[in-house]
Image (tube, rainbow, N blue to C red):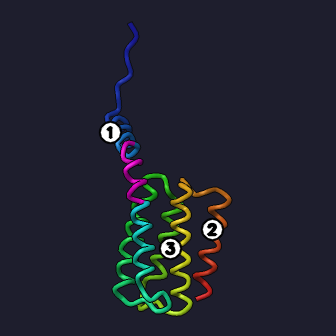
């Protein structure tokens, strides 16, 4: 009788964690839709040419959560776009060109989620991020 290989408990725990994340992915997809819709609702209810600090804080909170969670569930492009939005929302009241860039970021995040783009989005995702970064640099 051949000796069996010992099971590495770390590999078993990792497999269990990966299975748990996979099981939560569909639930997260719904949360992702809700979060991006909430970004849009907050933005639409604000003065999009000169949003106040309360609006910026609410948007930042949601974007920060997206940045931290989306990649865990395989939405790396969402993570990158949300990180860019967080950068725009840091430091002061966002008016003028910065406000336009914030609105564009929110629109892009909604399109990514509507199209259910997973991972980095490939070539299209790279173009989207490049455009968002260019928009942010112009401010």
Q: How would you classify the magenta stretch by its main secondary structure?
A: helix
Crowding at dot 2, Cα within 10 Å, few <14 / some 14-19 / many 20+, comes out as: some
Crowding at dot 1, Cα within 10 Å, few <14 / some 14-19 / many 20+, comes out as: few
Residue 46: give x, y in percent of width and height. 41, 85
Q: Earlier in the sequence, mark 3 or mark 2?
A: 3
Quarter of image, res 136: bottom right
Residue 69: give x, y in percent of width and height. 40, 60
Whether residue 28 is in magenta: the answer is yes
Q: Residue at x 48, y 70 (%)?
A: 82
Which residue is label 2 attached to? Answer: 128
Q: Is 13 rendered above or below residue 117?
A: above
Q: Residue at x 51, y 60 (%)?
A: 113
Quadrant where the N terminus sits is: top left
Q: Is 29 rendered above or below residue 55?
A: above
Which residue is label 1 attached to? Answer: 13
Residue 14: give x, y in percent of width and height. 37, 41
Q: Earlier in the sequence, mark 3 or mark 1?
A: 1
Pick the residue in front: 25 or 137: 25
Asked if disc 2 and disc 1 are in contact, CB closer than 8 Å, the reply is: no
Quarter of image, res 45: bottom left
Mark pair 3, 2: CA separation: 13 Å
Crowding at dot 3, Cα within 10 Å, few <14 / some 14-19 / many 20+, comes out as: many
Mark toward the viewer: 3 or 2: 3
Mark toward the viewer: 3 or 1: 3
Mark pair 3, 1: CA separation: 37 Å
Q: Secondary structure at mark 2?
A: helix
Mark toward the viewer: 2 or 1: 2
Which residue is label 3 attached to? Answer: 106
Pick the residue in front: 67 or 23: 23
Q: Earlier in the sequence, mark 2 or mark 1?
A: 1
Magenta region, residue range: 23-32
């Amino acid at each position: 009788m051949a000796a069996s290989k010992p099971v590495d408990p770390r590999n078993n725990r990792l497999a269990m964690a990966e299975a748990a994340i996979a099981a939560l992915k569909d639930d997260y997809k719904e949360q992702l839709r809700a979060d991006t819709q909430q970004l849009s609702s907050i933005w639409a209810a604000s003065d999009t040419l000169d949003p106040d600090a309360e609006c910026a804080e609410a948007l930042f909170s949601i974007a920060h959560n997206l940045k931290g969670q989306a990649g865990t569930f395989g939405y790396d492009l969402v993570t990158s776009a949300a990180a860019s939005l967080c950068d725009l929302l840091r430091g002061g009241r966002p008016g003028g060109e910065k406000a336009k860039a914030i609105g564009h970021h929110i629109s892009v995040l909604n399109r990514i989620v509507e199209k259910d783009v997973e991972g980095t989005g490939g070539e299209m995702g790279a173009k989207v991020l490049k455009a968002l970064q260019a928009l942010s640099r112009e401010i």
